[in-house]
Image (cartoon, grey):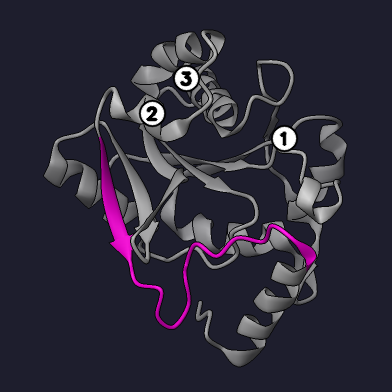
Amino acid sequence: MPEPVLAVILAGGLARRMGGGDKPLRSLAGQPLLEHVLERLRPQVAGIILNANGDPARFAAHGLPVVPDSLPDFPGPLAGVLAGLDWAAAHRPEVTTLLSVPGDTPFLPPDLVARLRAARAAAGTPMACAASGGWPHPPIALWPVALRGALRAALLAGERTIMRWTARFGCASAEWSTDPIDPFFNVNAPEDLAAAEALLRGGAAGS
């Protein structure tokens, strides 16, 4: 039986290209973007938490623990990963691995966790991240809870780049095809929402 994996959805950014506000709460095909992410994740993980800053009540309808960054000034996705690792250590001690995904990726593949696990095992590395079309997606990755102390120290020392930090320990890569759709398509701007709607209407996104 594979070890349980806890997922953290990263929603702690400022969404400047969307005009501010919470990207995961934007509507896509009649439901919040966040719900599309949750539908993809739920069958693959043993639990899901949301990394977001500010009033957690705005996410209450989704029934998720909301965990803010523990460091000030929005230091980026690594801070969200650290928040997830710390929450796992405190509340789910049986979990040794965290999956991180951005809150604006509505087409995550159904084999995300399985293939990241396989890549990590094959490479003998503590971490694995997703890639598609030859491009890495560092925020979509598996992280060992045991490295949370090292990550906190790096963030406090000013580290903000995921790939530079993971390179210290070793991070495998799992590649997905972008045909017929990039499973890691992310909604950064209003035109991306329109494109995602079109993909869903056309059936290219699958399920």
Q: Which residue is mark 3?
A: 89
Residue annotated with mark 1: 52
Residue 70 at least partly seen: yes
| Alpha carbons under labels 3 and 1: distance apart | 18 Å
Task: Say which of marks 3 and 1 sits in front.
Answer: 1
In this rendering, the count of numbered labels is 3
The residue positioned 41% from the left and 74% from the top of the image is 178
Q: Mark 1 to mark 2: distance in Å? A: 24 Å
Identify the main secondary structure in magenta.
Answer: loop
SS at circle 1? loop
Q: Earlier in the sequence, mark 3 or mark 2?
A: 3
Residue 117 or residue 173, whichever sits in front? 173
Q: Are marks 3 and 2 in contact (CB under 8 Å)?
A: no
Q: Residue at x 62, y 31 (%)?
A: 76
Asked whether 183 falls inside the magenta stretch, the response is yes
Q: Is residue 96 in view from this perspective?
A: no
Tell me which amino acid carries mark 2. Answer: Arg
Secondary structure of residue under mark 3: helix
Residue 38: horizontal and vertical position, in percent?
Answer: 60, 57
Amino acid beneath label 3: Ala
Q: What distance separates the C-alpha of mark 3 from that of mark 2? A: 24 Å
Spot occupied by residue 61 in the image (x, y as percentages of width and height): 81, 50
Q: Amino acid at mark 1?
A: Ala
Nearer to the camera, 95 or 103: 103
Residue with the mark numbered 2: 164
Mark 3 or 2: the one toward you:
2
Q: Residues within 10 Å of mark 2 (few under 14, many from 20)?
A: few
Residues packed near mark 3 inside 10 Å, few (<14), some (14 to 19) or many (20 plus): some
Stretch in magenta: 171-190
The image position of residue 149, as x and y in percent, is 43, 11
What residue sits 79% from the left and 66% below the top? 190
